Amino acid sequence: MVDSSGWLEYFADGVNADIFAEPLQDIANVLVPAICYYEVFKVVLRERNESDALQVLALMHQGITIDLTPDIAVQATKNSLQYHLPMADSIIFTVAKQFDSTLWTQDVDFKNLAGVRYIPKK
């Protein structure tokens, strides 16, 4: 699973893009929490344009979309309080945990959490 920061780094061809390309090579097996569509679309729309933002979403849709269910929402609330995570991060982290998936990220909020592959932003 790649969080929003990883998707954005990959799409922007940032310094860490090659690192995030590794899990994205197998896009059909990448979990994509629905909240990531919101976060990524918002940034690309703000910084580029709607056409680019829609192209990004098309690639993300090749992964496995995980909707926000009541069970995920409840567990995300617990994880938010336990790990001091913002709402979107707690949802992303919860999805990774519930599906026993490694979370690839460069978001410092996840730095010391189990099951996270944290790549420092350069």
Image (cartoon, rainbow, N blue to C red):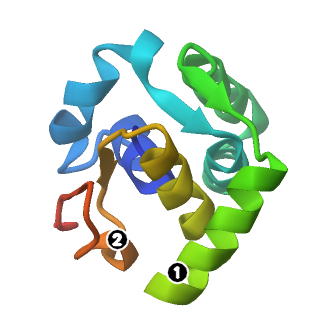
Q: Mark 2: which amino acid? A: Phe
- Rendered image quadrant of residue 114: bottom left
Residue at 51% across, 45% down: 98
The one nearer the camera, 116 or 46, is: 116
Circle 2 sits on which residue? 110
- Rendered image quadrant of residue 92: bottom right
The one nearer the camera, 118 or 76, is: 76
Q: x and y percent of residue 41 in the render?
A: 69, 44
Q: Mark 1: which amino acid? A: Leu
Circle 1 sits on which residue? 85
Is residue 2 placed above or below 92 in the rendered structure? above
- Rendered image quadrant of residue 112: bottom left
Between the residue at mark 1 and the residue at mark 2, the CA separation in whole angstroms equals 8 Å
The one nearer the camera, 33 or 61, is: 33
* Residue 6 seen in the figure: yes
Residue at 42% across, 36% down: 11
Secondary element at tag 2: helix
Is residue 68 placed above or below 119 in the rendered structure? above
Residue at 68% across, 75% down: 77
Secondary element at tag 1: loop
